Image (cartoon, rainbow, N blue to C red):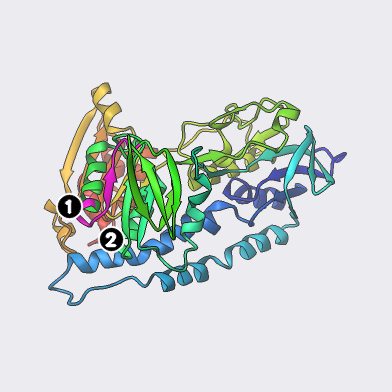
Amino acid sequence: MANQYDYDVLYLGSGHGTFDGAIPLAQSGAKVGVVEADMIGGTCPNYGCNAKITLDAPVALSREVERLAGVVDGKLTINWAKNVAHKNDVIKGLPGMIGGLLDSVGIDVFHGKGSFQDAHTIVVDGQEKTADKIVVSTGLRPHRLDIPGTELAHDSREFMDLTELPKNIAIIGSGYISMEFATIANAAGANVTVLMHSDKALRSFYQPYVEQVIADLEDRGVKFIKNANVSAFVRNGDQFDVEYGDDDKLTVDWILDATGRIPNVEDIGLEKVGVKYNAHGVIMNDHLQTSVENIYASGDVIDKTQPKLTPTAVFESTYLCKLFSGQTSDAIQYPVIPSVVFTSPRIAKAGVSVEDAEKQGLTVQTNHLPDDWYRQVDNETQGDDTLIFDKDHHLVGVTEVSEQADNVINTLLPAMEFKFGAAELGRLVYLFPSISSATWGQL
């Protein structure tokens, strides 16, 4: 590592694309700095995954009580204000905890907006910080519709901080955030309308399973408007009109713009130093190296085919730690990375998709999950999964819609990543009874 600079490695951003690798890198002896314009830890701990799953926990519980109606007497209702307060209690200590970990290994943290002055220099609040290597890990931010009245809409961060749940909510978009927050808001008592950009929701997931999720939400009162073509938001007294279609209008109390997330690549000097990027993020090679030799990228800000999720960012961050500390010189080799949408039922996937499996002529096995005795324990009445095998009967893909889809995918990941055959599968003895033992029996 070069010592003519202030730091061996300087990270722009402090999320999972940074701290999971920066901490062990500092422990290896490197001089490390981090620049953060917002909250330490980035999106996931503060206003993303951790907050979302905390708000969802009462929803999952209420669904289980609902399925066991008659066995369990009574009906649960979600106290929205207390749910949000509980979420705040759960996550409020995370920035301090992460900051404490950074401090404990001697990492300097600079609070402020950082921008490249040259390939080795970041300026933060007028102060220059130099480094041998710089990692761009600035993540994503909510996209905002470019239509009249866009300032009247809110984003996911604002939704999760609502102390009072609006009675009528319009959600624009039908991706992860839209479907998850529609589930949560509906379960807590709001009237929810989802205005879709096209005729498909969750387009990267197996559509027959997505349709099951939509059908369940519709049964619960969520309205879906396909091909909505939202054109404007207009204030209407204490409410708001969502103008869509040819000449249609929806009047609501609150609007959530959930039309996606976009990379934070503007106004940080990438053009100034020649780092190439596009609408999908920073362009990098198979060593996470950008078009400028000493500048790297990590996390959701990267333009990549892998899912832009926390586990991916963690893997990239720890890879860079190994690369910078001399533990490897190999290109990054991504593992099987799963994806889940925390609706109820969940929908999750990993590995080869059903669509690709059919094109490749792979073996596709579908199971109707309520037929399994274990699923009947808590009276699951809906759910399916599709397992995909290669010619040697190695599991290479799975997708599931069920209340426990996330746990099922986690159970099956080792078989996919390490290409377990009959001998390896036969060596695994799971706790019984459990969802893992029930799932493993399908192989």
The image shows residue 65, relative to residue 398, as above or below, that is: below
* Range of residues picked out in magenta: 218-228
Magenta region includes residue 167: no
Q: Which mark is residue 38?
A: none
- Crowding at dot 2, Cα within 10 Å, few <14 / some 14-19 / many 20+, comes out as few
**Residue situated furthest bottom in the rendering:** 73
Q: Residue 58: image x %, image y %?
A: 34, 67
Which residue carries the number 1 mark? 382
Q: Residue 93: image x %, image y %?
A: 58, 68
Q: CA distance from mark 2 to mark 1?
A: 24 Å
The image shows residue 417, relative to residue 371, as above or below, that is: above
| Residue at the image position 65 percent from the left and 29 percent from the top | 290
Which residue carries the number 2 mark? 431
- Image quadrant where one finds the C terminus: top left
- In the figure, residue 362 lies in which quadrant? top left
Sequence order check: which comes first, mark 2 or mark 1? Answer: 1
